[in-house]
């Protein structure tokens, strides 16, 4: 592998979109809005006009006594008068006016390249910084997935959801090396994410089978639990502080001098810097059709707990029905992004309010930030297939991915259970059992050192030994108690004629 580096910006289209609407045309439209409202008995004035790349906002000041609902009810009539596909009316934050959002007759294309070249993106410290698009006023808008900390994305066919996912992935690839971030792509449709096969940032192959997807999510839960043990060992509460601490010579010295009598579930060689994991599911509906309870449970656990240990989810669906976006899933995704939806009901399902059915498509979106109940309208950045292909070719030249096959492996109980569960039990089980009995104690780190296996396999062996009644339950940082007599295996060997 070559040393990790970030892609050059010349792979992207750096063209800035021109402002498409003339000022005199905007003034004329403002006059049409004011006169049309007066025809329906809604008095008020257009006090300001703010043109943007896709829509223009006309700031309407209602006269005293005019209800907001009276103006909102004129949406369709105003759209007809303005010859617009659809308009949207919403309160303007922090002001006593309403924003009448009118689509431009010629919308500008918001290329991703200029957003990536912007100093605000270049100077952002988080490797999970994403260029989302532009605001209604044309200002670049960026989001940090680490702070969201998970994202729910929905939108009808052709609304721009897939391009939005590509833009977010591209942003992270421009911000993070393969040491910083690892991706787990789950793409049951086998269309959108397969293009990223063999890029060095992959943790495992692109997952297309729903059963393997369920295994990958279970693996992510297991990895989350392992990471919490690592954080506890270093006495920190987040992945950022962990990665700082693990490089500190004083911390390394303290860990190296750990009292051998105080067994730990974590071996010393496991204490190394951790990358972020970004799990992207392109069509949740396909997974829920095959194994809804498993998928829902894993997603809920990750959404509830995985933020602190650097595991983040982006879950997308074009069918935001209640059987796909269940209450459990929605409750754990405060940050949501809705492209144009087919119906008001779909908008309410994803955002808990209507409005997305009035969007224009092609990247027009409502973005609900974490901790807010009011979505903001954004226009998503566009990245072409040619740009994506050029980026992928560049990344592949940097080296091959170090794929972890255990991510997609079926859980132990599906492969034959614990000890005595069939032909596919762990071949090292007997050796591990004899070792802990002869030593009179057992822990995952002990098996790691003595048997030279990885943490996941050692922990699995400990679980199997507990299930078979050889080891007792965990006792914090102390070794597990051996529940059988020291001559347990001697008696078995004697009976077997060994």
Image (cartoon, helix red, strand yellow):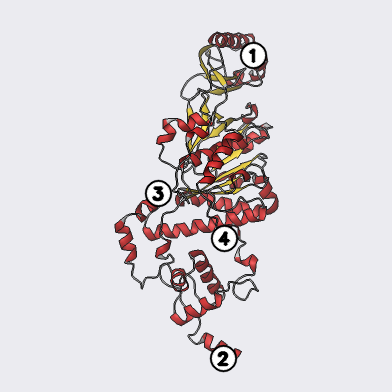
x, y percent for residue 498: 57, 89
Question: Which of the two labelled residues, at mark 3 and mark 2, occupies the earlier sequence position?
Answer: 3
Judged from the image, the secondary structure of the residue bearing numbered disc 3 is helix
Residue farthest right in this picture? 289
Judged from the image, the secondary structure of the residue bearing numbered disc 2 is helix
* Nearer mark to the viewer, of 2 and 4: 4
Which residue, given by chain and number where applicable, does mark 3 sit on?
Answer: 240
Judged from the image, the secondary structure of the residue bearing numbered disc 1 is loop
Q: CA distance from mark 1 to mark 4?
A: 58 Å
Left-right relation of 50 to 187: left
Which residue, given by chain and number where applicable, does mark 2 sit on?
Answer: 494
Which residue, given by chain and number where applicable, does mark 4 sit on?
Answer: 406
Q: Residue at x 40, y 35 (%)?
A: 123
Question: Which of the two labelled residues, at mark 4 and mark 3, occupies the earlier sequence position?
Answer: 3
In the picture, the disc for residue 82 is 1
* Nearer mark to the viewer, of 1 and 2: 2
């Amino acid at each position: 592998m070559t040393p990790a580096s970030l892609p050059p910006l010349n792979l992207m289209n750096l063209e800035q979109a021109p402002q498409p609407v003339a000022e005199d045309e905007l003034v004329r439209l403002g006059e049409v809005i004011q006169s049309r409202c007066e025809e329906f008995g809604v008095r008020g004035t257009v006090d300001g006009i703010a043109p943007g790349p896709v829509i223009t906002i006309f700031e309407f000041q209602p006269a005293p006594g005019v209800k907001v609902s009276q103006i909102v009810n004129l949406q369709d009539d105003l759209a007809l008068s303005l010859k617009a596909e659809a308009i949207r009316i919403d309160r303007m934050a922090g002001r006593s006016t309403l924003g009448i959002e009118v689509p431009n007759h010629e919308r500008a294309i918001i290329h991703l390249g200029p957003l990536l070249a912007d100093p605000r993106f270049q100077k952002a410290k988080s490797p999970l910084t994403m260029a989302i698009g532009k605001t209604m006023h044309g200002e670049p808008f960026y989001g940090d997935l680490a702070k969201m900390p998970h994202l729910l994305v929905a939108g009808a066919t052709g609304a721009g959801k897939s391009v939005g996912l590509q833009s977010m992935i591209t942003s992270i690839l421009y911000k993070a090396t393969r040491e910083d971030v690892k991706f787990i792509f789950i793409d049951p449709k086998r269309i959108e994410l397969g293009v990223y096969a063999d890029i060095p940032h992959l943790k495992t192959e692109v997952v297309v089978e729903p059963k393997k997807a369920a295994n990958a999510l279970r693996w992510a839960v297991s990895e989350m639990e392992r990471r919490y043990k690592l954080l506890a060992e270093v006495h920190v509460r987040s992945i950022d502080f962990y990665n700082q601490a693990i490089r500190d010579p004083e911390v390394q010295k303290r860990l190296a001098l750990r009292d051998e009598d105080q067994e730990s579930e974590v071996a010393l060689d496991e204490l190394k810097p951790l990358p972020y994991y970004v799990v992207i599911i392109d069509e949740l509906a396909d997974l829920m059709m095959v194994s809804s309870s498993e998928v829902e449970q894993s997603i809920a656990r990750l959404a509830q707990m995985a933020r602190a240990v650097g595991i983040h989810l982006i879950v997308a669906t074009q069918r935001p029905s209640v059987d796909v976006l269940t209450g459990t899933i929605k409750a754990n995704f405060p940050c949501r992004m809705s492209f144009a939806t087919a119906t008001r009901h779909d908008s309410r399902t994803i955002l808990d309010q209507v409005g997305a059915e009035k969007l224009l498509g092609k990247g027009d979106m409502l973005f609900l930030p974490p901790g807010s109940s009011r979505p903001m309208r954004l226009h998503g950045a566009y990245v072409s297939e040619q740009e994506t292909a050029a980026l992928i070719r560049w990344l592949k030249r940097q080296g091959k991915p170090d794929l972890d096959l255990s991510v997609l492996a079926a859980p132990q109980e599906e492969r034959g259970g614990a000890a005595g569960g069939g032909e596919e039990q762990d071949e090292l089980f007997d050796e591990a059992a004899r070792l802990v009995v002869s030593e009179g104690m057992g822990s995952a780190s002990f098996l790691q050192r003595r048997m030279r296996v990885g943490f996941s396999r050692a922990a699995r062996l400990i679980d199997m030994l507990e299930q078979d009644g050889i080891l007792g339950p965990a006792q914090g940082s102390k070794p597990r108690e051996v529940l059988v007599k020291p001559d347990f295996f001697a008696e078995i060997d004697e009976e077997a004629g060994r």
